Amino acid sequence: MALRLWSRRSLPLRTLLRRLPVNEATRLEPSACVWRVSCISTGAGGDRGAEEQATAPRPVFLRSKTRVLRTRESLAQTGDSLRATRKRVTENVEQTKRIVTERMGHLRENILTIPNGLSLARLCSSPILGYLVVTEGYTAALVLFAAAGVTDVLDGWVARSFPSQQSMLGTVVDPLADKCLVATLFLSLTVAGLIPIPLTVLIVTRDATILGCASYLRYTSLPAPKTFLRFFDVTLATVKFSPTSISKANTAVQLGLVAATLAAPVFGFVDHSALHAFWYLTASTTVLSGLTYLFTKDAYQFIRKDKS
């Protein structure tokens, strides 16, 4: 109907619609829209008169209802897609948390065991023994050293007899306590003049080298992120150390030499030839055990417990 009132001599229909007020351009009755367009195009005013009264106006929106419906459908689909994506992300996060918890649970272990407690007690007794030797309290030092030896035998028996008392930490703490005990006693006995200096230097150098190699293996096997706290996290086991036969024999020989040297002042056989032979035997086993740790891979094993 509006097209009938529009002619080529009139203004363009788009221009006429732009001249309409905003409130009228957005919502108009059909008769009002036709009348306003005809007045603007012809430049005439006037009244709608009987035409307006004769027709019952019905509200008409100039914007497309089809486009509105499509927009609503698109928004509804987008909302459903976002809700589905959020659900998938939540499920993935929960699954990731569960997997990480399971894997870390396999790596972490219980460290509160009887063998670990005995090894820790033996480790703490090292400075006390060193003090007793330096102050010439050989009798008390011999008794305390015997007690430390009993704890060494006892923690090994408990770990072998009760599998629940075994731990990866125990494979590190037990030899570490022995090394600290032996090194402390050798240093203190050397200061007291009961053991030659070259033998003590050899033993300390060998133990320091093994400790450095163990630290390197620990760092390389540590999962990311490799931080200082994670490096010393005793519950995060990454490497299992297994003593070799020659290293066990070397530990027994060293402890035997320490016991004999502590007993020498008490029972009066200092500078005995048997002690001198013990020195050479200890030096030989120390060198052999050090070479075994450095050039064989049987002494350590990386722990791989990742589950697919």
Image (cartoon, rainbow, N blue to C red):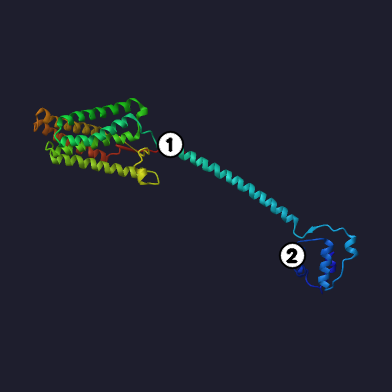
**Residue 37 picture location, percent across and down:** 81, 68
Picture coordinates of residue 12, whole percent (x, y) = 78, 71
In front here: 305 or 297? 305
Q: Residue at x 89, y 65 (%)?
A: 49
Lateral position of residue 258 relative to residue 82, left or right: left
* Drawn side of residue 98 relative to residue 67, left or right: left
Residue 230, percent across and down? 37, 43
Say which residue appears at 23% left-offset and 28% top-offset. Answer: 147
- Which residue is identified by label 1? 105
Disc 2 residue type (three-letter): Val
Residue 79 in sight from this viewpoint: yes
**Residue pointed to by mark 2:** 22
Image coordinates for residue 176, horizontal then vertical, percent = 27, 37
- Callout 1 touching callout 2 (CB < 8 Å): no
Residue type pointed to by label 1: Gly
Q: What is the number of callouts on the image?
A: 2
Question: Residue drawn 88% across and 62% down?
Answer: 52
Q: Dot 2 surroundings within 10 Å: few (below 14), some, or many (20 or more)?
A: few
SS category of the residue bearing label 2: helix
Q: Based on the displayed image, in which of its 4 quarters is residue 170 positioned?
A: top left
Regarding mark 1 in the picture, which secondary structure is present there? helix
Quarter holding the N terminus is bottom right
Question: Foreground residue, 165 or 33?
Answer: 33
Density class for disc 1 (Cα within 10 Å; few <14, some 14-19, many ≥20) is: few
Between the C-alphas of marks 1 and 2, the distance is 68 Å
Mark nearer the N terminus (1 vs 2): 2
